[in-house]
Image (spheres, rainbow, N blue to C red):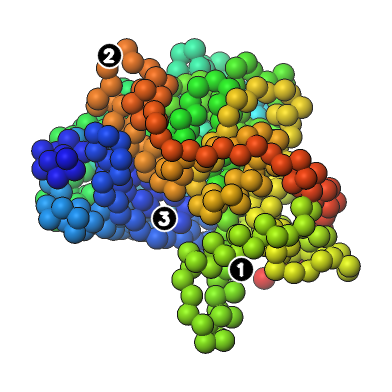
Amino acid sequence: MSIEEIRNGSAILGIEFGSTRIKSVLIGRDHQVIASGSHEWENDYVDGIWTYSEEAIIAGLQASYADLKSDVLSRYQLPLAKIGGLGISAMMHGYLPFDAGMKLLVPFRTWRNTMTGPASEKLTGLFSFNMPQRWSLSHLYQAILNDEPHVKDIAFLTTLAGWIHYLLTGRKVLGVGDASGMMPIDSDTCTYNAAMVNAFDRLVADRHYPWKLADILPSVLCAGQNAGTLTEEGARLLDPSGELLPGCPLCPPEGDAGTGMTATNSVRARTGNVSAGTSIFSMIVLEKPMSKVYPEIDIVTTPTGKQVGMVHCNSCTSDINAWVSLFREFASLMGLQTEAGDVFTRLFRKSLEGDPDCGGLVNFNYLAGEPVTGLSEGRPMFVRLPDAAMNLANFMRAQIYASMETLKYGMEIMNRENVAIDCVYGHGGLFKTEGVGQNYLAAAIHAPVTVMETAGEGGAWGIALLADYMVYRAENESLEDYLQNHVFTGMKQMTVSPDSEDESGFNRYMERFVSCIPAQKAAAEHFRN
């Protein structure tokens, strides 16, 4: 069947730009992955800004697609010349301003930057709505406050997914979920909140810019709407070999939060998911608005425009990766050759032998600032009590706890708000080792956590599903019903409930973690190059 789908061009392609990997997946009509490709990359820290260069973005897109093509040829002995639909997803938020000729005015400022504090605070007060530092409008207003000369020349402001989509289609559009990370969305109209757009225009009126906010933002589309077709230029950009034919439809470009919700069937009210990779965030689809504004909780939307409470943390697995790399270097020194995947699995399983509170060890995985805990800069930091039980199991448990400690800090607010949660799905690399990250997350958020067999596929599969929904859904079939009835029915999954001993232990660990936040702040202030 896969061969025929590739031959007749009915397979669906999804591409997602993650923080460390650009992944491409091709799915068949049964929604299973029939081929995949990827490209590893890393952000750069240039002049105090986390960024990816334009050249790296385009080269990464082409390399990931080329790897997919190679996989198709290897598996099926067929070239990939035609596809039935395409979706682009990427890291949300950040700042990509273009002039009228679509020239990028300043280097891409990613979500990881915590440099917009004054703007974030001002806009939060103006809107009575939490405006995090990483949101596109916070970046725009901070650039205005900084009197940056490029602002007057802005003709278009978008996200990474929105820019790639433009290059492939010529359309300046954005999926509502990704748009909700630029500025607040009105769920009733499924577009930007009109009152807040007007308030922003009044706020900057004295600057006399030649644009109004609505003029420079992408148009907003909901899941299922057609967002354009792959142009000849777009096809050549994606596949410089010239084999890929233009003309396939594209779904609205989405952010990694929306694709994570889709990939875990958590787009209905009272469901949620936790995405854990370079960053970690929880998404809980709300039944009703929260009682007040919390700076620790963002309000974004599902790909269909429903309100979602989001706790977003900048750091998750990067510090674990660094320590595992160190352990592998030591093993090599001792003459032992290791595979990264095997080392991760063994160390994760070893953590299960540790004390529930990590035995007096505390780890901060803060490679960047964490607004949830009030820190604009971060320094990875490992501390322990003098009489701590310093062993490998406790060390690894502390590393994994650290990957979700800031998330837990924010999720406790939702618990106090009595936000209804029927189920939470975990996805991303943290959950690949069965019964470890999943168990600890359940203890952290005091709720059952389910991991499905697609947990490792992540957002590339999620955006492929959104493209599939656009192409193949029945008339008037909701995304929620489409996923439940056609994609996830019968899918293998495993659910764990919180272990009371782990919950108590994680709570004790958190008391120590919170007590060390001033030390983390001092390290950021005084430990510099």
Q: Work out whether mark 1 precedes mark 2 in sequence or the reverse, and give the earlier one.
A: 1
Under circle 3, the secondary element is strand
Measure the C-alpha gap from mark 3 to mark 1: 19 Å
Image quadrant occupied by the N terminus: top left
**Which-is-in-front pick, marks 3 and 1?**
1
Measure the C-alpha gap from mark 1 to mark 2: 51 Å
User: Which mark is on residue 323?
Assistant: 1
Q: How many marks?
A: 3
Q: Is residue 178 left or right of residue 441?
A: left
Query: Residue sitting at 25 percent across and 53 percent down?
Result: 68
The answer to whether any part of residue 148 appears in the image is no
- Give the camera-side residue of 321 and 389: 389
**Which-is-in-front pick, marks 2 and 3?**
2
| Position of residue 60 measured from the top left corner of the image (x, y, whole percent) | 33, 56
Q: Is residue 448 left or right of residue 180?
A: right
Q: Amino acid at mark 2?
A: Glu
| Position of residue 64 measured from the top left corner of the image (x, y, whole percent) | 30, 55
Under circle 1, the secondary element is helix
Q: Work out whether mark 2 precedes mark 3 in sequence or the reverse, and give the earlier one.
A: 3
Q: Amino acid at mark 3?
A: Arg
Query: Residue sitting at 78 percent across and 45 percent down?
Result: 501
In the picture of the structure, the residue carrying the numbered disc 3 is 21
Q: Work out whether mark 3 precedes mark 1 in sequence or the reverse, and give the earlier one.
A: 3
In the picture of the structure, the residue carrying the numbered disc 2 is 475
